[in-house]
Amino acid sequence: MIERIRERLRRRRYRPEVASSTATIKVVRAAGGVIAGPDGAVLLVHRPKYDDWTFPKGKNEPGESDEACAVREVEEETGLVCTLGEELTTVEYIDRKGRPKTVRYWIMTSDGAAVASNEVDEVRWVSPVQARSLLSYDRDREVLDAFLARTRR
């Protein structure tokens, strides 16, 4: 993974000291969930800061496990206290600040009502077909595909 990240940094012409083989590259760790709702719906969140639609997720706090981060971030963004289910997938990319980022996702369930909060201004239950067109990033569509593969067995 580190070699792939270094290659991405080289291709994007970042400062040589960041991409050098002796530099330590700190990977931003994050986690989130795909919340399974009624009739096969999934919950998406809109973040006004980025004007995007995505699954709820966020960065790990120091010393926090990825599982605890996923549950905390989903609750912070949606108000839902969720049950952590099966792990779905891990997504790696370069974030908006040029840092390598790794996000782990889990299937989650909840009986509560979702409410936008924290960095989110809207939450929306949508069908998988609607989610595919509404999601802002291809990497989130890959997460959706992993969810569908696991839940339609």
Image (cartoon, rainbow, N blue to C red):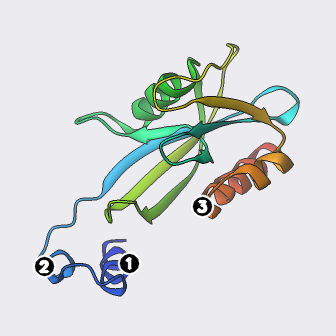
Q: Amino acid at mark 3?
A: Arg
Residue at image position (62%, 19%) is: 115
With respect to residue 112, does 101 lie above or below?
below
Q: Is residue 95 left or right of residue 132?
A: left
Whether residue 112 is visible, yes or no, is yes
23 or 11, nearer to the observer? 11
Image quarter in which the N terminus is found: bottom left
Q: Is residue 134 left or right of residue 30?
A: right
102 or 54, nearer to the observer? 54
Q: Which residue is mark 2?
A: 17
Count of marks placed on residues: 3
> Is there a contact, CB below 8 Å, between mark 3 and mark 2?
no
Bin the neighbour count of mark 1 within 10 Å (Cα to Cα): few under 14, some 14-19, many 20 and up. few
Residue at image position (50%, 39%) is: 57
Mark 3 or mark 1, which has the lower sequence index? 1
With respect to residue 120, does 110 lie above or below?
above
- Give the label on residue 4, or none: 1
Q: Amino acid at mark 2?
A: Glu
> Is there a contact, CB below 8 Å, between mark 3 and mark 1?
no
Bin the neighbour count of mark 3 within 10 Å (Cα to Cα): few under 14, some 14-19, many 20 and up. some
